[in-house]
Image: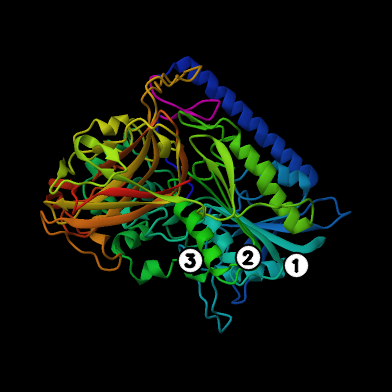
Amino acid sequence: MDYRMTTAHQLITASGEPQRAGSNTVSWLLATLMLFASLCDAHAQGVDYIKAHYTKREYQVPMRDGVRLFTTVFPPKDTTQTYPLLMVRTQSGARPYGPDEFPSTLIGPSPLPHFVKEGYIFIVQDVRGRWMSEGTFMNMRPHNPDKRTPQDTDESSDTYDTIEWLLKNVPNHNGKAGLYGTSYRGFYAACGMIDAHPAIKAVSPQAPIMDWFIGDDWRRNGALFLAHAFNYMPMIGKPRPRPVKEPLFSKFDYGTPDAYDFFLRLGPLANVDARHFKGGVPFWNELMRHDTYDAFWQARDLRPHLKHIQPAVLTVGGWFDMENLFGTLELHQRLEADNANGNHTLIVGPWIHGGWNTGQANGASLGHVAFGAETAKFFREKIELPFFEYHLKGKGSFGAPKAWVFETGTNQWREYAAWPPQNTQPFALNFHASGRLATEPATDESAFDEFVSDPAHPVPSSGEIGSGMAPELMCADQRFASRRPDVLTYETDVLEKNVTLVGPIVADLHVSTTGTDSDWIVKLIDVYPNNTPDPNPNTSGVRMGGYQQLVRGQVMAGRFRNSFEKPDPFTPGKPSAVKFTLPDVCHTFQKGHRIMLQVQSAWFPLLARNPQTFVSALSATESDYQKAIQRIYRSRDLPSRLEARVLP
């Protein structure tokens, strides 16, 4: 999803970087005023340009079952040539409503002035049951592959019917259409390319949702992404009894900038609805009630339906996207597996969720990590626009590789004929005594490390006061965690040469717990040399020597280690295998750096606390939250390791 909680301590500077409390107040105020002025100016220029060059028309477009979907169309005023249709379907509103009300951008929330100047017929549509569209909204509406009557509809058929109507009723088009969207809108774009209308020639699902239980948004391998779900549910989980032009929700007032404290005081998850939502957010209760990978979630898995895809597809994501990197990678992999002769390109850059078009300006940095170039600007001008120009207008060329990804660490774009790359070698890092991480296997007959996991004092997901969903979290400094007694840290010697990891990573652990349930979190970290220079200027006061940059992190809810459908308790004290895949990487650990792994059982409040007793999240009470002694085994018979692929 695409909503991040803003808290009082996150003051935004003119560069778009968060400035923490304690920074110079005068500097912050001047920077904020400058940013506000520049945003107002950009908004005015966008609106003025659109009014001067485009007409706005609003329609209620009928679907095959008679339900009408509110659709805004922006055709160019210049009718001396024809234009393709470029549509975004959205759950977040085709605002502003009214024939005389113009937005500052024309395809959803993304600032794409280069598209506007090139000329397209832009379409923004409220999906069924949202905002001004008729019908009943269903979150991540399941695809229906067996449509026999006009009443058998889904997002694919709604897209088809919309394109068919537009072709017949909107003049001056060239007969070609494209779909576009980020996050939830990326899901709708992906749905639209299934059984696509013949006029749809190009689709760009960006950070699309694929599966809400395994890897996108609300859960990771069954573990609840608490801060994200709590923040977004009031926006997407409330019913809409009638068409509306203004939101039926408002941002939740936490009463504190410290989300760690807020969620800890909240107690068991049942208190969320009892204290705050009070039955007004039904989808939150659905999320709690469906606590295993049951038919409810399986029906919302889009991957099995991505077959026989005809349009060209540009799938886009960010390496530091906390929300839908899983969906990005899974969509591309499924397209390649089930549509071998298709025209599919994967783009992954050093971005947060949607950072290629919003949130990261030109993509030159994220938090304290610099990328050496304006990566988002490069994508928009050299990849995104040429993709649509070629496929919808026949202009220029688009000879992109199968995968065009940004290699973090060395800060360069890489082109590959397949993703993951095929010319790789296996690479394993094994856990050893004294926190050592090495390529040689463990040889001890009986060895382990242990820590105490206490739900009353969970490991924080950030070293700073904040929402638990700070945009830069996935590349943030982890030194705060490596110094906690409830985090095990393993580290290589100083690297004598560059090590480039590409593709998925597998955490292969042997563990035990004195409880009956537990989460297991593994974080892959790039440790900078002690003499790494600080930024200049260094307005935040960060010290980059010894910086522990998070490269990838993932959790496995231990109850699902054997099956997502049938959870399984741990036998207290008995070793058990826990094996899971971390999302792909393309990162070079440079010569002179170290590779670090951190293992922990809490990541709060990014993740909900595990009671460490085998109870469902909805029914857990205060007494169910228990301390547990966690062991990581590193012996010959019970090894623990990280498995990856490296470029030779």
User: Where 365 sits versus 606, above or below?
Assistant: above
Q: Nearer the viewer, residue 635 or 216?
A: 635
Give the foreground label among 2 and 3.
2
Q: Earlier in the sequence, mark 2 or mark 3?
A: 3
Q: Is residue 183 left or right of residue 285?
A: right
Q: Is residue 282 left or right of residue 413?
A: left
Label 1's element?
helix
Give the foreground label among 1 and 2.
2
Q: Residue at x 49, y 47 (%)?
A: 2
The residue that mark 2 highlights is 342
Q: Earlier in the sequence, mark 1 or mark 2?
A: 1
Residue 422 x %, y %: 51, 55
Q: Residue at x 69, y 35 (%)?
A: 44
Which region shows up in magenta? 10-22
What amino acid is labelled 3 in the image? Arg
Label 2's element?
loop
Dominant SS type (magenta):
loop
What amino acid is labelled 2 in the image? Gly
Q: Quadrant of residue 486?
A: top left
The residue that mark 1 highlights is 167
Residue 243 x %, y %: 54, 60
Q: Residue at x 19, y 51 (%)?
A: 636
Label 3's element?
helix
The residue that mark 3 highlights is 303
